[in-house]
Image (cartoon, rainbow, N blue to C red):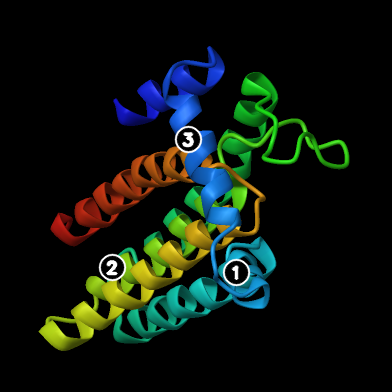
Amino acid sequence: MLFALLSWQVAVSGPLLTADEHAGRAAVGSDVPRAVAEFAADLGSPLVAVPPAAVVVLVCVLRDRRSGVPSWWLPLAVTVLATAAVPALVVPLKILVARPGPDGPLGGYPGFYPSGHAATAAVAYGLAALVLLRRTERTAARRLAVAVAGAGVAAVGAGVVLRGYHWPLDVLGSWCLAGLLLGCADRALRIRAAGP
């Protein structure tokens, strides 16, 4: 529901946009060093976010296969589908909404809502954490997986706003969309765990 509300506000230039743009401009003028913000933003690039998540999932899948776990391949399939869904959903939304970025349209990009980097990071890091959570009962390992994924997602969100690549609502909308995808992935992984 929050994703629908945010998308509607952005599409119709609703009252939330004034506060959003004010917050975005204030963030760009903050004291965070440019190199730090750029590094954080880059953590959401598909070339940066997807490979480590893929390695985590592949290691878990290969262990399951060697151990004879039924449906050992399902986490890999869920990861591929959820990761592919990010651009399949984000790009049409960007074109449909056509929201200008903080500095106006850049180099032919169709729009800035939702943020592709924020969605990619949330889905990739979130999927790695979900798969790891299914592999361990140790509380410390579970907390570490969630903390690392959460830190990566938060860093990307802050980075793209601090660098002026996206407005805060672009990031929040991406996180909502990623939450939907991760919810579906979690459901698929739970079905697997409950299966024969």
Give the left or right position of residue 139, taking residue 55 as reference.
Answer: left
- Whichever of labels 2 and 3 marks the residue nearer the N terminus, that label is 3
| Circle 3 crowding by C-alpha within 10 Å: few under 14, some 14–19, many from 20 | some
Q: CA distance from mark 2 to mark 3?
A: 47 Å
Name the residue type under label 3: Asp
- Whichever of labels 1 and 2 marks the residue nearer the N terminus, that label is 1
Q: Disc 1 on helix, strand or loop?
A: helix
- Residue 70: mark: 2
Q: Is residue 57 above or below residue 96?
A: below
Q: Nearer the viewer, mark 1 or mark 2?
A: 1
| Viewer-closest of 9 and 110 | 9
The residue where tag 1 is placed is 37
Name the residue type under label 2: Pro
The quarter of the rendered structure image containing the N terminus is top left
The residue where tag 3 is placed is 20
| Viewer-closest of 85 and 92 | 92
Residue at the (64%, 72%) spot, across then down: 48
| Circle 1 crowding by C-alpha within 10 Å: few under 14, some 14–19, many from 20 | many
Q: What x and y, as percent, mark residue 2?
A: 31, 29
